Image: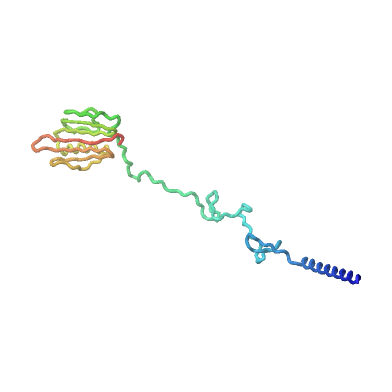
C-alpha cells in the first residue's frame, strides 16, 4: 500500500513537470508584446512598424543650408526675399505730399497788427490818441475829429472819426490798398442810408470803414472802427 502511494506521488510530479514545460515552451514562441501608444491611441509592435501598416513617423524636413531646421515657408529672410522663391518684398514706401503744388505760392506770413505791451485806454479830440495802432492810417487830406483806444488783455478796440476832401470811393479805395496787403480780406458791410461800408477781416482781427457825403457838403465824413488782437 505504501509503495502504491509513493508511485502515485511520483507520477503526479512528472505530470506537473510536463505541463510546466509545455507552458514555458508556449510562452517562448509567443509573438512580441504589443505596446499601446497612449498619446495617439494607435498600437505599435515594439521594435517594428505601426500596427496599422504605416511606416515610421514623418521626420521634419530640414530647410536648405540649415540641417535639422524646419522650413518656414513664405517667411522673408533678411534680404527681403521670400523663402519660397517669390519676389523681393522690401519695406513699403509712400510718396511724400509736397508742401505746395508746382507753380503755387505758399501762404504769406503777415506782420502782427498790434503787439504787447498794449497802451492804456485813452481818447483824444482833434488828434490821434497816444497808442493808436500804426497799421490804421488816416486817409489823405483828413481832419481828425476824434480817436480812441480801449485795451483789455491782448485785445484792443480802436475808433477814428474824421473828414476829408476826397470822395467816398477814394476813401474806401485808400483803405483797401492799405489793409489788403496785411492779409485783411475786404467784404461789403451793412451801412446806414447814404453811407457805404467795407469790412476787413483776418483771424481775430476785424476793421470796418464807413464813408458818406452829405448833400451839398464838400467833405466826406468817414469812421474807422475795429478790434485787434495780439499775436494774430
Q: Name the residue rendered at 23%, 39% in the picture.
A: 200
Quadrant location, the N terminus: bottom right
- Residue 38 position in % (x across, y down): 64, 60
Q: Residue furthest left?
A: 216
Q: Name the residue rendered at 18%, 42% in the picture.
A: 190
Q: How many marks?
A: 0
Quadrant location, the C terminus: top left
In this orientation, which residue lies closer to the viewer: 36 or 222? 36
- Residue 207 position in % (x across, y down): 23, 37
User: Colour scheme used in the picture?
Assistant: rainbow
Residue 112: quarter of image: top left
Report the side of 43 relative to 175 (left or right). right
Report the side of 50 relative to 174 (left or right). right
Above or below 87: residue 151: above
Residue 203: quarter of image: top left
- Residue 3 position in % (x across, y down): 91, 70
Residue 83: quarter of image: bottom right
In this orientation, which residue lies closer to the viewer: 72 or 140? 72
In this orientation, which residue lies closer to the viewer: 172 or 60? 60
In this orientation, which residue lies closer to the viewer: 203 or 33? 33
Amino acid at each position: 500500500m505504501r509503495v502504491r502511494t509513493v508511485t502515485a506521488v511520483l507520477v503526479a510530479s512528472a505530470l506537473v513537470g510536463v505541463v510546466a514545460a509545455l507552458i514555458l515552451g508556449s510562452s517562448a514562441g509567443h509573438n512580441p508584446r504589443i505596446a499601446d501608444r497612449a498619446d495617439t491611441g494607435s498600437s505599435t509592435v515594439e521594435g517594428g512598424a505601426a500596427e496599422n501598416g504605416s511606416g515610421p513617423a514623418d521626420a521634419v524636413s530640414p530647410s536648405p543650408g540649415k540641417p535639422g531646421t524646419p522650413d518656414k515657408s513664405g517667411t522673408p529672410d533678411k534680404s527681403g526675399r521670400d523663402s519660397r522663391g517669390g519676389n523681393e518684398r522690401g519695406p513699403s514706401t509712400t510718396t511724400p505730399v509736397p508742401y505746395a503744388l508746382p507753380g503755387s505760392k505758399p501762404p504769406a506770413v503777415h506782420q502782427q497788427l498790434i503787439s504787447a505791451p498794449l497802451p492804456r485806454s485813452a481818447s483824444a479830440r482833434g488828434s490821434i490818441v497816444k497808442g493808436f495802432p500804426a497799421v490804421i492810417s488816416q486817409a489823405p487830406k483828413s481832419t481828425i475829429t476824434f480817436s480812441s483806444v480801449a485795451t483789455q488783455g491782448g485785445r484792443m478796440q480802436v475808433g477814428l472819426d474824421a473828414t476829408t476832401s476826397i470822395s467816398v470811393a477814394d476813401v474806401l479805395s485808400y483803405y483797401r490798398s492799405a489793409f489788403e496787403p496785411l492779409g485783411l480780406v475786404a467784404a461789403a458791410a451793412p451801412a446806414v442810408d447814404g453811407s457805404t461800408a467795407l469790412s476787413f477781416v483776418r483771424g481775430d482781427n476785424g476793421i470796418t470803414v464807413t464813408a458818406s457825403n452829405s448833400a451839398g457838403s464838400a467833405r466826406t465824413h468817414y469812421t474807422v472802427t475795429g478790434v485787434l488782437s495780439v499775436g494774430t
